[in-house]
Structures are given as C-alpha cells and as structure tokens.
Amino acid sequence: MEVSVFDRTETTNKLISNSTYNLVIGLTLIWGFLINWWMVLNIPVESISNINPLFFFIGYFVSCFFGIYLFSKSDSPIISFIGYNFVVLPFGLIINLVVSQYNPDIVLEAIRVTGMVTFVMMLLGSMYPAFFNKIAGGLTIALLCVIVVELIEIFIFNTHHGVLDWIVAIIFCGYIGYDWARANAIPKTYDNAVDSAAALYMDIINLFLRILRILGRK
C-alpha cells in the first residue's frame, strides 16, 4: 500500500507508453460499462426493489467505499481492478433502477450525449490541466451544496427542481476534465491507469444519470 493514486509523483512499478496507458484506461472503462449493461439486461428490477432500502443503501455505500479504498491505495493493478468492480456492481444496481423508468430511446440518447460530452471534457482536460486543477476545490464545494439542497427538497419539501440536474451535470463535466488532467499528471503505470479509469467511471456514470433525467423530462 502507498499514497493515494493522484498524489503519486514517482513509482517503482513499470512505466508504460502513453498509448498503452490510454488503452488500459479505455478498456477498464468499457469493462465497467459492459458489466452495467449486462446487469440492466439480466437482473429484474423487481428483485432490486424488493431489497430492504436500509440494507440496500448500507450495502451500496460499504461496497463503494471499500472499492474506492482498494483502488486508491493499492499499487497493484489486480487489486485496483478488484476494487473497481466493487464500485461498478453497486452502481449497476442504481443504473438498473433508474433506466427502468425511461423509454429505451431516451436511454440510448443519454448514452450518446454522455459519450460526446465525456470526449469533449477529456480533450479540454488535456488542453487546460491547470484550469481544471484550479477549479477542483470549487467543484467539490458546489457538489456538496447541491447534495444538501437536494436532500432538503426531497425529504422536507417533497419536491425536486430540474435546474439542480443541470448544475450537477455541469459539476461532473468539470470532474471529468479534472480527473483526466490528473490521470495524465501521474506516472503512467498499469495500476495508475486502472485507478484513473475508476475515478472517471464514477464521473461518467453520475453525468449519465443526470443527463438521463434531463432528457426524460422533455
């Protein structure tokens, strides 16, 4: 075990080329998306809905935080990949619950829009890494504020304003650019590629879920 992935400035692991590094990131992301796709197609929504909500969310957060701990602290690509899957699986259950509420055409449109936005933000992250590093703190504060506002709206006022989905989508656009910039600033190893993909996966899925809600209101 060693320091958290994005704080690494040196490594004893084997360095790999830029193209191999980016390929590993891409393949790791594709793996996560395919697992989620399989879960949507093969796990009945009713079987998830029947789980006690308290147990479901406890399991969800325990699995996610355990996975994040594994991939962020480990310098082994195999252990990091295992941690990544501990994040992918609970996210897949949430995705399953959410997409079941929408027309398949809207889901496909949301996937397409998310893909295009992700590509653009990665490109910007490569071009302007210093900018994204500067706004990182603001993104975190903004996200925490939006989460608090959403919780108050849902549990106290029993409502939800659509503008919050736009705000969260913009925040996660920023996070994609930020995490991509960070991914390219650390030593290029197999483990760091898996770790970077895991961080990007969470950004992309959160962006997708918000875009889906926005498109679903049309």
Image: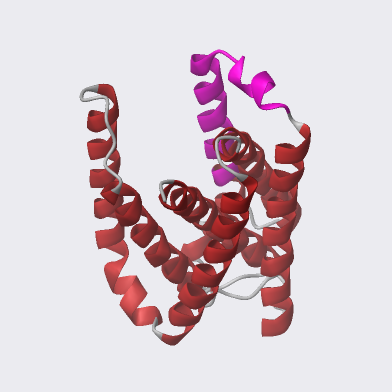
Residue at the front extreme, as displayed: 218
Q: How is the image coloured?
A: secondary structure
Image location of residue 152, percent across then percent down: 23, 30
Near-viewer residue (19 or 160) = 160
Q: Of helix, strand and loop, which mostly describes the magenta segment?
A: helix
Near-viewer residue (18 or 34) = 34
Image location of residue 60, percent across then percent down: 55, 30
Image location of residue 94, percent across then percent down: 56, 35
Q: Quadrant of residue 169?
A: bottom left
- Give above or below for 102 relative to 105: above
Q: Is residue 109 left or right of residue 156?
A: right
Q: Residue at x 49, y 77 (%)?
A: 120
Residue at the bottom extreme, as displayed: 127
Magenta region, residue range: 44-68
Q: Is residue 60 left or right of residue 164?
A: right
- Give above or below for 103 relative to 100: below
Q: Residue at x 64, y 44 (%)?
A: 88
- Give above or below for 202 relative to 45: below
Image location of residue 160, percent across then percent down: 29, 36
Near-viewer residue (159 or 141) = 159
Q: Residue at x 67, y 71 (%)?
A: 189
Q: Is residue 14 left or right of residue 168?
A: right
Is 18 in the magenta?
no
Q: Quadrant of residue 194?
A: bottom right
